[in-house]
């Protein structure tokens, strides 16, 4: 097995492992440690069907059941595809998952934000593109002036699946989604469990700040968002067939990049999200 850093501060690639078979305790530890060190991991040359990806993900904890509904009203299963392919063939105009194009962290609308996401390249656009982009919210926090860090400390942010349209332009939540995921509150600055590291916790679900007038809160959230997505905090993943990505949701935001011919070419990724049970029990 080989592990290679992809940038100075963020992301590593692993080769020489097969995640389609049960993994050893040693490999599981290595995967955890590599993600703790680099936050984003790309495991190369994998062949994973849905069951294999689910079994691999479950090695790290219980899987989250997303609240997002498909246009037919059915809730996405725990292991689900993000695709612009239509069920009946061809390209779909339904933008029900278009929200992934806005900066977010998966599952921020749950009381305990999840730990890992896994994303597997099922079908990539033949002409290229369809990247996934990340920002390092730890580096974004570290780069804030000291006085601003102090001013933000203690602020509590309301995250809402249903109201993500207020900041992102994604569609508003349906009645079922509102029922399944009422708004939750998270600190604006997260301390990553078991470390001294602090990170901004924002994204498209962050819609209000407790005790702050909405207009002022929206302005502050927008300013911090612009600060966080600066190029120096970014890693852009250019997918290759066989890539399985796995990342730490607690200190990153990510988004799907629309840099492919989405009216003609299919892009399908398969996702699982692993709950943060240690934190839930703390
Ligand atoms: C996601 O938001 O989890 C998926 C991102 C992508 O489709 O690149």
Image: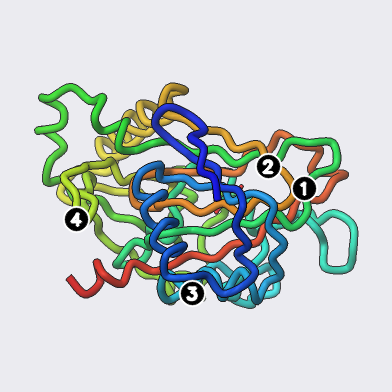
Q: Which badge, 1 or 2, comes first in the chain's sequence?
A: 1
The location of residue 84, given as percent across then percent down, is 76, 54
Q: Are marks 1 and 2 in contact (CB under 8 Å)?
A: yes
Circle 2 packing at 10 Å, graded few (<14), some (14-19), many (20+), is many
- The answer to whether residue 67 is visible is no
Q: CA distance from mark 4 to mark 1?
A: 37 Å
Q: Secondary structure at mark 2?
A: loop
**Residue 256's quadrant in the figure?**
top right
Name the front one of labels 1 and 3. 3
Q: With respect to residue 89, does 134 lie above or below?
A: above
In the picture of the structure, the residue carrying the numbered disc 3 is: 58
| Residue positioned 25% across, 35% down in the render | 216
**Residue 109's quadrant in the figure?**
bottom left
- Say which mark, if any, is on residue 239: 2
Q: Secondary structure at mark 3?
A: helix
Circle 1 packing at 10 Å, graded few (<14), some (14-19), many (20+), is some
| Quarter of the image with the C terminus in it | bottom left
Q: Secondary structure at mark 4?
A: loop
In the picture of the structure, the residue carrying the numbered disc 1 is: 124
Q: CA distance from mark 4 to mark 3?
A: 22 Å
The location of residue 122, given as percent across then percent down, is 74, 58
- Say which mark, if any, is on residue 194: 4
Q: In this image, 68 relative to 25: left or right?
A: right
| Residue positioned 69% across, 52% down in the render | 45
């Amino acid at each position: 097995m080989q592990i290679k850093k992809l940038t100075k501060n963020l992301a590593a690639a692993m080769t020489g492992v097969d995640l389609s078979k049960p993994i050893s305790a040693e490999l599981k530890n290595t995967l955890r440690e590599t993600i703790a060190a680099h936050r984003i991991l790309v495991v190369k040359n994998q062949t994973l069907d849905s069951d294999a990806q689910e079994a691999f993900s479950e090695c790290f904890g219980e899987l989250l059941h997303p609240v997002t509904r498909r246009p037919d009203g059915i809730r996405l299963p725990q292991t689900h595809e993000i695709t612009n392919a239509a069920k009946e063939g061809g390209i779909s105009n339904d933008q029900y998952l278009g929200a992934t194009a806005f900066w977010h962290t998966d599952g921020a609308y749950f009381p305990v934000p999840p730990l890992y996401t896994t994303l597997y390249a099922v079908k990539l656009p033949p002409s290229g593109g369809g990247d996934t982009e990340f920002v390092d919210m730890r580096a974004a926090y570290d780069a804030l002036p000291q006085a601003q860090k102090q001013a933000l400390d203690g602020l509590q942010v309301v995250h809402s699946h249903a109201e993500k349209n207020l900041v992102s332009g994604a569609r508003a939540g349906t009645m079922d989604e509102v029922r399944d995921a009422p708004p939750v509150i998270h600190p604006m600055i997260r301390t990553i469990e078991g470390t001294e590291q602090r990170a901004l916790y924002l994204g498209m679900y962050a819609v209000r700040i407790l005790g702050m007038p909405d207009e002022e809160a929206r302005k502050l959230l927008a300013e911090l968002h612009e600060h966080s997505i600066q190029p120096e905090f970014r890693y852009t993943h250019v997918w290759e067939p066989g890539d399985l990505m796995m990342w730490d949701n607690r200190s990153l935001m990510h988004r799907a990049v629309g840099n492919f011919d989405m009216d003609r070419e299919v892009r399908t990724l398969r996702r699982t999200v692993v709950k943060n049970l240690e934190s839930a029990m703390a």
